[in-house]
Image (spheres, helix red, strand yellow):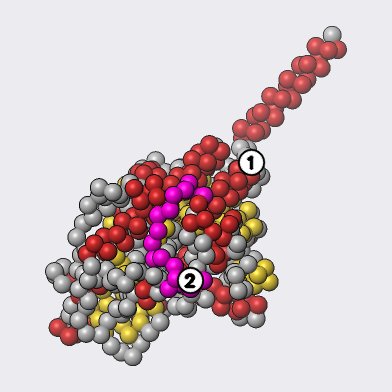
Amino acid sequence: MKNRKSILIICFVSFILFLVSCENPQPKKQPNILLICIDDLRPELKSFGADYIISPNIDKLAAQGVSFQRHYVNAPSCGPSRFTLLTGLYGPPNNNALFLRAKQIAEGKTTNPSMPEWFKKHGYTTVSVGKVSHHPGGRGGVNWNDSSIIEMPNAWDKHFMPVAKWQHPRGAMHGLADGEIREKPSEMDVFQSAEGDDNSYPDGAIANATLKELKTLALDNKKPFFLAVGFIKPHLPFGAPKNYYDKYENVDFPKIKHPEKPEGRTTWHDSNEFKQYYRWGKDPNDDADFANEIRRHYAACITYADAQVGKVLDALKQSGADKNTIVVLWGDHGWHLGEQAIWGKHSLFDESLHAPLIIHDPRVKQAGFKTNAMVETLDVFPTLCDLAAIETPGFTQGVSLKNIINKQDAIGHYALAYKVGATTLRTDTLRLVLHHDGFVELYDYRIAENETKNVAEAYPELVDKLKMELKAKLE
């Protein structure tokens, strides 16, 4: 009789606890963040209109999320572009932008947290693998592995660059197959396709390390994670395993658009980063076959990087964490492949500033669409705060893209970018470039000359209007 009474009491207590739990449901775990950064990736992807490119994994992500077809970075080189992504602020135009910020933090001149630090303050475990900030692994020093020189103080619970046979982060950053490190650029081939598996190039090591981190993070049921991974290719020198190059053996690349050098004074440059490598005495602006080879190797690097992205996304799905993980894929800037007679970045033309951006939130029902709303890298920080339902810090200068992701709202905004000596504003049909000495460039995308003809003198009133727009955006 006592046993029966005890059982009844236990059942009654359990029922009461069940009712209480129903009335006060446990809060859902905040969404995880997976940020995938790809170096020097222009929107040369099938999901962004390049039908000749083999990019199945990134395209699959685009089909699940929102691909921003008109995303522009805020600077045409790695360091300052990543500064804007990771801080939500316009910053210095140089590659040492984040190191300068670290110095300001040490001197007490700024207390604004970076994006990963902000998520860390809100309960996230933050991990960085590969090239997320400018230096792979986020450290300075001769070989970029000095733990006393941190590029982003207070940002990461763990940050590192797996170097494998490339000895150190600097070696992996500018490495080719099987541990070859750039010592003298003039003695290193500008492109290469060596026999070997994915691990014969540095990004294979980055992918493998990311899979291990992801497995550990997914097992933590107490804290959400902010995992950032940065792949190096297609950064120079263009190197990928030969099987990726072979995929483009019979592919015909489209004709290079507006290949002429622009007339007069512009932000054009002489492709010095590209020309420092060994090129067998060839110039792609004069040699169509050589130009085609460069484009083929660049495409091979994209497909190789795409394969590494696929490994990470597959591991995310296998872990089960994909159902509560917002995935962002971001290219840090564009790259000229002969447009305006440039082979590189560093200009303020579209090819240097236009880069892919994909955001996939598994909680959003209306997904898998392309938007032509104009956005910029600065918007990523406030967007992720908005999607994760955490406060957006007041200092950020971008805007949340949540309405576009949730409602397919096509309204975007002008995009601002800068380099040393000049600032630019991109509108729907125009680009204004304002040099710091007052010289002006204006390009009209509605005419055939595109970015090869400066029409500023013909439209002084329009120039004045855009100058005011640019000034307002900086305030």
Residue 417: horizontal and vertical position, in percent?
37, 73
Residue 322: horizontal and vertical position, in percent?
51, 41
Residue 406's place in the image compared with 20, above or below, is below
Locate the N terminus by quadrant: top right
Give the residue pinned by disc 2.
79
Residue in view at x 52 percent, y 55 percent: 178
Give the residue pinned by disc 1.
219
Locate the C terminus by quadrant: bottom left
Q: Is residue 186 magenta?
A: yes
Q: Which quarter of the figure has residue 19?
A: top right
Task: Check disc 2 and give the amino acid type.
Answer: Gly
Residue nearest the observer in this picture, 6 or 112:
112
Residue nearest the observer in this picture, 411 or 182:
182
Range of residues picked out in magenta:
183-199
Residue nearest the observer in this picture, 181 or 439:
181
Residue in view at x 41 percent, y 65 percent: 189
